[in-house]
Amino acid sequence: MAQYLLSVWHDDQNFPQTTPEDMERMFVQVGAFNEEVQAAGKWVFAGGLHPITTATVVDASKGDPVITDGPYAESKEQMGGFWVIESEDLDEALEWARKGSAACEGPVEVRPFQGE
């Protein structure tokens, strides 16, 4: 069985505009989705991420490491969380991503792990 990364993306600039009621609804929906993935035996692990402003980039590609605050990617969309699942094939992973996208009310990118 192959493993897939389902990454949750959102516009970091508009995310603070989400109301507490909207956040609570999404937390409940994502919790139910997590339970469904676990019950199906597809769960590997998952996690939510702190805002991109908490990121630190380490670049040692040219020798001594350079450490900088902030995101590496210059993009308005940021990864906010992820699931790693086991799936029979891409079609099944896409169906889980559809359900995850509905639960978190945002786009979910699906990528297979190398060697899978």
Image (cartoon, rainbow, N blue to C red):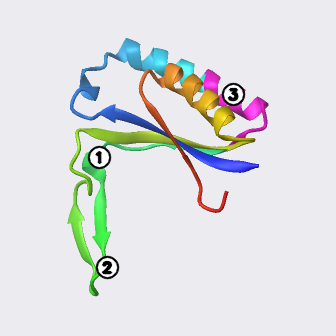
- Residue under label 1, please give it: 52
Indicate whether 98 appears above or below 9. above
The three-letter amino acid code for the residue at tag 3 is Glu
Picture quadrant where residue 114 is located: bottom right
Residue with the most extreme top position: 21
Q: Which label number is shown at residue 61?
A: 2
Q: Which residues are magenta?
A: 32-43
- Where disc 2 sits, the SS reads loop
Q: Residues within 10 Å of mark 2 (few under 14, many from 20)?
A: few
Q: Is residue 113 magenta?
A: no
Judged by its main secondary structure, the magenta piece is helix
- Residue under label 3, please give it: 35
- Is residue 95 or residue 9 the one in the foreground? 95
The three-letter amino acid code for the residue at tag 1 is Ile
Residue with the most extreme bottom position: 63
Residue 39: percent from the left, percent from the top? 77, 30
Residue 59: percent from the left, percent from the top? 29, 73
CB of mark 1 within 8 Å of CB of mark 3?
no
Nearest to N terminus: mark 2 or mark 3: 3
